[in-house]
């Protein structure tokens, strides 16, 4: 998978992008998604792109029949008042007023004595008058009329209309209560569901609100645009609250070892101050810890390494600047950017020519949105050593994340000039050229890269991605297969890519699921594999299993933005599951909406 720095820069960008309701295209996945670069970013990007895809999936032709008539009856009976009686003459109007007044004074006893037909007729009269008052915003009056209408005849519409009065007078608890009454009588009453959802939202009961809006949408077959928008809004709200909670309450921990080694490989190993011990006298107390830390690092025991670097620093060691650089790096990977900056700054106080520390500071500043300072740090690094390949590579990354692909191309080219043995420079160069609009250049760089790194699974994989984006499906598949054949380590991406091709182009979700499963065997914590797997399962209507993958992924998600994306997905799945529980007899309606593509 990707090398490079996890970054919030691009996550923030994606968060502010409007979510596209369109079914995402292959292009979205293979080119517009930055998953290959900044791992943390990737998930968010993909999730944002996938969005709530299945909410807008093509709708099946809806059955006409009794539902239709039911709806039109309801539409009639709930028609907003105000203009209902405009055609009437004054005389009849007054007569009606008197009539209403009379009915309003009926006691429950008198009402019970009336035959049912009469009660129904009167209740309709009272309700119509209620609608008129409602239309004129006289809610207290309307409320009284609906209350009396209910006394004549228990009708869900009357409760729902009275709920609207309560809602408009900010009496949300009563509004909810009335919607409950309406829904007890008619659980499929879309208007009452929407109203209760709104009242729940006003009282910060966001999950309940979301579940009601979801039910309203599914039952209403997604015809009310406001409800679909509301779902989107509520999903974001619920997810953001939960994401903050999780971030605040969980212990900070390092990401997966695969993630860390990828990140570390993006910097060349430079020993700026070779460890030397001339005599026992020169040996500092922390040196032993430092040696231990280096050993742990080589063994990829990162937590132990981090701890040992810390002890070396506390006790004082000969390689102080390097120890600080490493502890800062781990601190950063744990998500504590400011703590990391402190360590890098201290390292720079000891060694003002520590290029790598400058570069790492620059990327953190970039994440924090301090772009001016970030560029300055890169300049500082160049002043110290204009021939350090790392500087150009990481500055290229930053340009790339900011979609300045022409500039990124220059940086990667410089990186390759200075040191041609880094496969990721070729990959990044090819993709930047491609994204800058030059397909032929991008493909050319890939071919060049393949000559040089014929045994690189990564090179084959990314070449395959460009081909896939060109809809050159067969050749892309060949490259992914080659990558799989060559892979020595846990590199799940080629399987994920095959899954994507099967899912989106070959229209074979079962095969896609199979490939995803393989990817997850190789790399169980892979963000992309978990995401795509849950997307496939959601699209196939297998909500419960999809949710399991999302929950697993949630545990390893690193940034708040990433979590937010996952949680939006998970909440969408949960609200659909809730729908199935509440309306088991209508689960097929859901299946037809989310079902096979
Ligand atoms: C509401 O209607 C009642 C009875 O018709 C009337 O007395 C009252 O002034 C009206 N209130 C408003 C705000 O229009
Ligand atoms: C959607 O909301 C807008 C603004 O609140 C409103 O004017 C419109 O009538 C609503 N549409 C439906 C179908 O409820």
Image: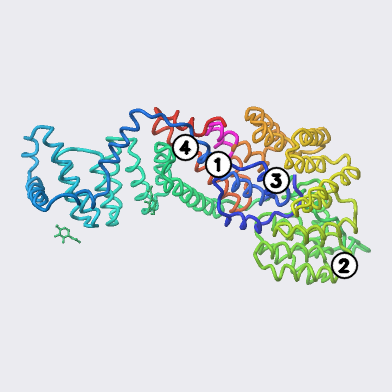
Task: Estimate the x, y position of residue 462 in percent, counting from the top left.
Answer: 78, 43
The residue tagged 4 is 576
Whether residue 371 sits left or right of residue 575 in the image: it is: right
Location of residue 485 (image quadrant):
top right
From the image, which quarter does the N terminus lie in? Answer: top right
> Which one is earlier in the sequence, the residue at label 4 or at label 2?
2
Mark 3 vs mark 1: in front? 1
Element on which disc 3 rests: loop
Tell me what residue is drawn at x 52 percent, y 36 percent.
58
* Relative to 558, residue 508 above or below: above
Task: Estimate the x, y position of residue 299 in percent, counting from the top left.
Answer: 80, 45
Element on which disc 2 rests: loop
> Which one is earlier in the sequence, the residue at label 4 or at label 3?
3
Is disc 1 surrounded by few (<14), some (14 to 19) or many (20+) residues within 10 Å?
Answer: many
Label 3 C-beta lies within 8 Å of the nearest ligand 2 atom: no
Magenta residue check for 545: yes
Q: Are the two marked residues, 4 and 2, in contact with CB atoms closer than 8 angstroms?
A: no
Element on which disc 4 rests: helix
Q: CA distance from mark 4 to mark 2?
A: 56 Å
Is disc 4 surrounded by few (<14), some (14 to 19) or many (20+) residues within 10 Å?
Answer: many
Location of residue 538 (image quadrant):
top right
Q: CA distance from mark 4 to mark 1?
A: 14 Å
Foreground of the two, 472 or 43: 472
Label 1 C-beta lies within 8 Å of the nearest ligand 2 atom: no
């Amino acid at each position: 998978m990707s090398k490079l720095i996890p970054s919030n820069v691009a996550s923030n960008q994606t968060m502010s992008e409007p979510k596209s309701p369109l079914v995402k295209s292959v292009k979205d996945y293979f080119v517009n998604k930055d998953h290959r670069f900044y791992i943390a970013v990737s998930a968010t990007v993909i999730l944002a792109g996938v969005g709530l895809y299945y909410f807008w999936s093509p709708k099946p032709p809806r059955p006409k029949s009794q539902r239709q008539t039911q709806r039109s009856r309801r539409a009639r009976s709930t028609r907003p008042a105000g203009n209902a009686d405009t055609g009437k003459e004054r005389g009849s109007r007054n007569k009606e007023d008197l009539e209403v007044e009379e009915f309003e004074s009926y006691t429950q006893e008198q009402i019970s004595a009336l035959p049912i037909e009469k009660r129904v007729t009167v209740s309709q009269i009272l309700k119509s008058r209620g609608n008129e008052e409602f239309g004129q915003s006289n809610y207290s009056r309307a409320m009284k009329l609906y209350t009396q209408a209910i006394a004549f005849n228990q009708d869900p519409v009357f409760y729902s209309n009275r709920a609207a009065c309560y809602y408009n007078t900010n009496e949300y608890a009563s509004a909810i209560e009335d919607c409950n009454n309406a829904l007890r009588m008619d659980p499929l009453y879309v208007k009452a569901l929407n109203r209760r959802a709104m009242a729940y939202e006003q009282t910060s009961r966001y999950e309940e609100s979301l579940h009601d809006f979801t039910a309203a949408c599914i039952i209403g077959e997604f015809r009310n645009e406001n409800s679909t928008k509301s779902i989107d809004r509520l999903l974001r709200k619920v997810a953001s609250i939960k994401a903050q909670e999780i971030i605040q309450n969980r212990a900070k921990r390092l990401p997966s070892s695969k993630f860390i080694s990828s990140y570390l490989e993006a910097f060349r190993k430079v020993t700026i101050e070779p460890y030397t011990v001339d005599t026992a006298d020169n040996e500092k107390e922390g040196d032993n810890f430092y040696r231990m830390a280096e050993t742990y690092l080589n063994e990829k025991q990162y937590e132990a390494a981090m701890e040992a670097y810390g002890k070396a620093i506390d006790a004082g060691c000969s390689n102080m600047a390097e120890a600080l650089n490493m502890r800062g790096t781990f601190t950063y990977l744990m998500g504590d950017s400011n703590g990391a900056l402190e360590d890098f700054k201290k390292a720079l106080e000891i060694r003002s020519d520590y290029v790598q520390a400058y570069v790492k500071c620059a990327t953190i500043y970039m994440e924090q949105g301090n772009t001016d300072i970030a560029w300055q740090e890169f300049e500082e690094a160049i002043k110290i050593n204009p021939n350090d390949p790392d500087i150009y590579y990481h500055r290229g990354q930053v340009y790339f994340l900011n979609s300045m692909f022409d500039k990124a191309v220059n940086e990667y080219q410089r990186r390759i000039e200075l040191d041609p043995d880094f496969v990721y420079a070729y990959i990044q160069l090819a993709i930047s050229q491609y994204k800058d609009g030059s397909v032929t250049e991008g493909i050319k760089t890939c071919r060049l890269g393949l000559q040089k790194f014929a045994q690189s699974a990564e090179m084959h994989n990314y070449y395959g991605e460009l081909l896939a984006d060109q809809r050159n499906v067969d050749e892309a598949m060949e490259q992914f297969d080659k990558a799989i054949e060559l892979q020595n380590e846990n590199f799940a991406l080629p399987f994920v890519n095959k899954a994507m091709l099967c899912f989106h182009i070959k229209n074979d979700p079962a095969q896609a699921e199979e490939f995803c499963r393989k990817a997850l065997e190789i790399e169980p914590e892979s963000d992309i594999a978990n995401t795509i797997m849950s997307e496939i399962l959601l699209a196939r209507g297998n909500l419960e299993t999809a949710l399991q993958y999302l929950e697993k992924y949630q545990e390893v998600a690193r940034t708040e933005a990433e979590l937010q994306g996952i949680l939006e997905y998970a909440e969408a799945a949960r609200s659909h599951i809730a729908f199935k529980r509440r309306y088991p007899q209508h689960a097929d309606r859901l299946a037809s909406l989310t079902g096979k593509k």
